[in-house]
Image: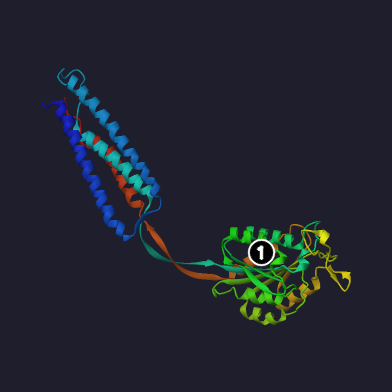
Amino acid sequence: MTEPTSNYRKLLQLTLVAEAIFWAVAGILYAVAKPSAMSFLHPGMFWLFGLIPGIFVVFLLRWQWKSRLYEQYQGIGKTRMIWVTFQPVRYFLQYFFLRSIVFFLVVALSQPILGSRKVKGSRRVLDLVICLDISSSMNTMDIEANTSRLTVAKRGMIQLLNNLKGERISVVIFANEAYTQLPLTMDYGAAKMFIQEIETAMISDQGTNIGSALEVAQSQFIDGESGHAIVVITDGEDHEQKWQEQVEKIRESKIELSYYGIGTSKGGLIPNDPYDLQAGYKRENGSTVVSRLDQDGLRKMAAATGSDVEFSSVPFPDMSGLIAGLSSVKNKTVKEMEFKVQKNYFQVPLFCAFCCFLGYLFVPFLVKRPQQ
């Protein structure tokens, strides 16, 4: 009979050789696939390969124990300790399949990516430009004590952003002139930061020129397949009346235009410095200027373009009505798109792991115990 130590030595040698071959083949396959832009979505999962040496040590200790037990009882006879056997092939297959299960599961969890494919699809899109009036009249504190119309308007804009879903947003600020404060973006976090920083002092040329704001807003619409919408937030005191020049362009471009009036009909004084009321209030011809929300002017502008108009005189305006209108515009516009999707082959190592699991279950049937 072969010496037990010899059987154990052969089992160890067989395992080490098999391991060397297995990892060499895996390394060669990886080296061949890597130049073809192979990558992994979750490469951090490779740390789980550290379980394999642990599995090897556990099997090694078990083999040593079984080897000593077999050496001790193999000569006692057929009636005692008949279950004590030492089967190198069976033990090797058990280790090989269990180790392979772990290996392929780790590879599947890392999600190998190789190549890409083109996918055609469509999505509903909308480009929204918010035109915010930052003329000095927006410093009027007629809605809430120590709170300007501009602050109230910015609260409404933040609330509007919180309810958007996938629209691209742009912010245009205007007084007597208009400027793009934020180009079209889907980064709502950045948009909120820009909005919080807006002050009436950003434009020195004061006045209210809604026409200039509409002109700059239209220049943002460079994507012809998207739906286009403009929201003008103002107290309505348009001194230039140039908005009429933009009416025909807006109609031809099928731009959805909405107005949102901020302020009260009673109105209030315009502070020279919204942060220091002791600096006094704006005066004209020796009298203090009272700024009121021009509802009639905004209704006239809205009627000229068939636009919606809403008014708010509360500290926290609700723009949900505007959002509902924007959703109807978005639903009319479907943009056809073609984009690349990376090919994920996690199912291949997962299938290999399943096959190894079946192999592990059938080891007792592949290698049967010897009859005593």
Question: Label 1's element?
Answer: helix
For the point 28% across and 38% down, which residue is it?
Answer: 360
Q: How many marks?
A: 1
For the point 66% across and 63% down, which residue is it?
Answer: 323
User: Which quadrant of the figure contains the C terminus?
Assistant: top left
For the point 30% across and 59% down, which residue is it?
Answer: 35
User: What residue occupies the far left of the structure in this picture?
Assistant: 1
What percent of the width, then of the height, locates residue 1? 10, 26
The three-letter amino acid code for the residue at tag 1 is Ala
What percent of the width, then of the height, locates residue 132? 69, 67
The one of 49 and 255 positioned closer to us in this rendering:
49
For the point 79% across and 74% down, which residue is it?
Answer: 297
Q: Is residue 163 visible?
A: no
The answer to whether 56 is drawn above or below residue 269 in the figure is: above
How is the structure coloured here? rainbow
User: What residue occupies the far front of the structure in this picture?
Assistant: 279
Look at mark 1 in the image and give the residue it sits on: 324
The one of 80 and 147 positioned closer to us in this rendering:
147
Judge left or right: residue 14 versus residue 293: left
What percent of the width, then of the height, locates residue 66? 23, 26
Q: Quadrant of residue 15?
A: top left
How would you rate the neighbour count of disc 1 (Cα within 10 Å): few for under 14, some for 14-19, many for 20 or more?
A: few
Judge left or right: residue 175 versus residue 369: right
